[in-house]
Image (cartoon, helix red, strand yellow):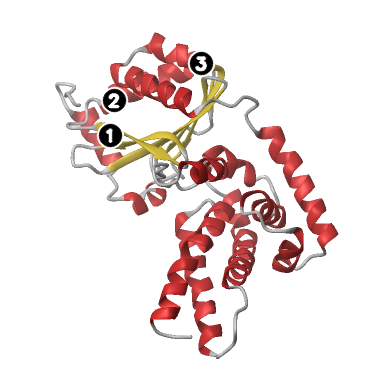
Amino acid sequence: MSGPDEAELLAELRPASFAIAYRMLGSVAEAEDIVQEALLRVHGTLEAGERIGSPRAYVATVTTRLAIDELRSARSRREQYVGEWLPEPILTDSSDDPARHAEMADSLSMAMLVLLESLSPEQRAVLLLRDVFDYGYDEIARIVGKSEDNVRQLASRARARIEQGRPRFRTSREQRDELARRFFAAVQEGDLAGLEALLAHDVALTGDGGGKVPALARALRGRSRVARALVNWIRVGARIPGASIRRVEVNGTPGALLLDGDGRLIAVWALEISGGEIVALNSIVNPDKLGHLGSVADTRELLRLVVSRPDGGSGG
């Protein structure tokens, strides 16, 4: 196969390959590299005149094996990471296919991707292929090169570990969106009491700067501490001329882009909501994790300008 037919096939396979790679790695850049390599291998196999019985299974196999190899080689890098590690955020949109979105959103959430970090590469692959992408155990055994019994054991252990960390209470989409609306209104108004009323007692605020920009050294916990930190952050942000907060959906959950006056990204926020409360706020400020979303602000320079302004400045 070559020409338009092959190009069409590769275009169809790309989203499926990225869906696996991103969930495995939590990194857009690393996932894109793996997708490129997987599609090159599909192309090479077809160019050699070999027949691929199931292109979907073929690309899933190549993508998964490449992702497992990448996780093994990245382990030391993750262990040496400065501060808290959070996944690279992606912007999602539920308007195209709400049912499909709801089914896949949980596996995209920051909370789930962080939980997946606690699993071995093989456990991660088996859990995702079985519970998210609905592959049979026999197919997964062929993909990861293990026996079917071994794959079932890996899935069972992975599921048990993930269930321990999952939120206990679900919140409807309508409740979630209304809670997010009230949260961002309170943030922008600097309403401390209003924020505290929306936060869980043991809410966690996590910042990922990767040592590149100022960020929390470790997660901040507790309703009043988190609310005060957010109000202080917004006071500083309000001194950046033209700064704004744009609400978006981040990894299938409510979130926002924090922008400077030129529309450059300062941070991405993603909320975790359970039982009608905000249980966590993740703030990604590491510029290396934001570049795929647009131009990124020089946060250190912005802070220097804010501190040096004699009148304290004003902002939006």
Q: Residues within 10 Å of mark 2 (few under 14, many from 20)?
A: some
Task: Give how far across and how far down residue 6 sits, in percent.
Answer: 45, 79
Q: Which residue is mark 1?
A: 303
Disc 1 to disc 3, how far (Cα)? 26 Å
**Numbered disc total:** 3
Residue type at mark 3 is: Arg
- Image point 36% across, 38% down: which residue? 267
Expressed as whole percent of the image width and height from the top left, the position of residue 295 reads 27, 50
Judge left or right: residue 170 versus residue 96.
right
Q: Is residue 285 above or below residue 9?
A: above
- The Cα atoms of the two marked residues, 1 and 2, are separated by 8 Å
* N-terminal-most mark, 1 or 2: 2
Location of residue 232 (image quadrant): top left
Asked if the residue under mark 2 is in contact with the one under mark 1, i.e. CB atoms within 8 Å, the reply is: yes
Residue 298, compared with residue 220, is above or below; it is below
Pointer 1 or 3: first along the chain = 3
Question: Which residue is painted at 63% across and 41% down in the image?
Answer: 115
Identify the residue at horizontal 47%, vertical 42% (top origin): 251
Callout 1: 10 Å neighbours few (<14), some, many (20+)?
A: some
| Residue indicated by mark 3 | 223
Residue bearing the label numbered 2: 236
